[in-house]
Image (tube, grey):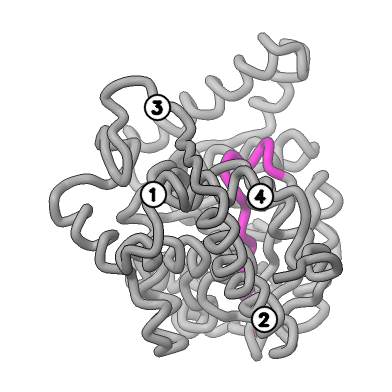
Amino acid sequence: MTFERIGVVGLGIMGAGIVEVFAKAGLQVIGVAESESAVEQGKKNLATSLDRAVSREKITQVQADEISSRVTWGTDFELFAECDLVVEAAPEIIGLKQQIFSELDRVVKPEGILASNTSSLSVTAIAQSTDRPEQVVGMHFFNPAPVQKFVEVISTEKSHADIVAAVTELARSIGKSPATVGDKPGFIVNKLLLTYLNHAVRLLDEGVASRETIDSAMREIAKFPMGPLELLDLIGLDTSVEVLHTIFADTQDPLDAPASSLTTLIADGHKGRKTGAGFYDYSNKHEAPTSADDDLKIQVHETLMKAYLHTARQMNDSGYASKSDIDMGMKLGCGLPEGPFETMSHFVA
């Protein structure tokens, strides 16, 4: 199976990044958005990214011009007619994605593959809006797509194995490190990451430890790049809660329901860095939290790591992701120093 012409729906930062990834790989790319203004923004997003790469001497101006020349822009889905693969990168709204896939099913050639960049929604539900569910997969890039190497390729029970294999190989051929995963909310990275972050908030809500102790425990002992509450502020509390709702709807585990502090902060308009405040205040320079309570930090670390590793083990035992893919996902997708199964080899609580 060969891929020569790729379509991308949605030209925000993520969509434009996916356009850039494919165009850099030498493929012809068609970028489509819902309006002329959205198309212009997509062009601007690509140009800004390429200019940054030129200024950092990652590519030459000639290469940047060549990349741009491989992209066709427009607002008409009919432009996708001869695409071998179309990747949807619209907002995480299931009804919107289903509407897009229904239209793609109408216009894309019968052998064309349709992929969603969803980070947590059901690919199976999205595929139901088409007459080609066997040719629908998830292809979840991480932000920023031109930089992040990890890609989750999600298969449904109806996805043809050769289609999944072809998309996985395509991801590898464009310089990514793909993992194949079953269609469960959150897939690998968001399922493990958000349940861990939510558990950290529950420790705060229960009065087990302060935010500073929780965050410093995971940075200093686990060597994670950020503490869980800091990371929630960076991701956005509202975005995190949406993913947790999706996970909870699947598991019905009360521990997966958004912790109370998350919903309270959101209700007060505090959604993290993007609003200037979340668990921390960002009106002034934010310093990494510290705590002198070493014994409590050890307790927090052990509690959070036990739950995190248990979820990873369940994920593998259920058969929907391999140990190696889970480890790769958490290292490349989250920047962790090691994957959960690597941690299990030496973690002693």
Residue 31 position within the rendered picture, expressed as x and y whole percent measured from the top left: 53, 43
Q: Which numbered tag is attached to residue 221? A: 4
Mark 4 neighbour class, 10 Å CA radius: few under 14, some 14 to 19, many 20 or more: some
* 197 w.r.t. 29: above or below: below
Q: Secondary structure at mark 3?
A: loop
Mark 2 neighbour class, 10 Å CA radius: few under 14, some 14 to 19, many 20 or more: many
The residue labelled by disc 2 is 315
Residue placed at 26% from the left, 25% from the top?
A: 283
The residue labelled by disc 1 is 211
Q: Secondary structure at mark 4?
A: loop
Q: CA distance from mark 3 to mark 4?
A: 21 Å
Q: CA distance from mark 4 to mark 2?
A: 24 Å
Q: Secondary structure at mark 1?
A: helix
Q: Please state which of residues 266 and 171 is positioned toward the viewer in this rendering.
A: 266
Q: Which numbered tag is attached to residue 286? A: 3
Residue type (three-letter) at the residue carrying disc 2: Met
Numbered range of the magenta stretch: 134-148
Residue 265 position within the rendered picture, expressed as x and y whole percent measured from the top left: 21, 53
Determine which quarter of the picture holds residue 319: bottom right
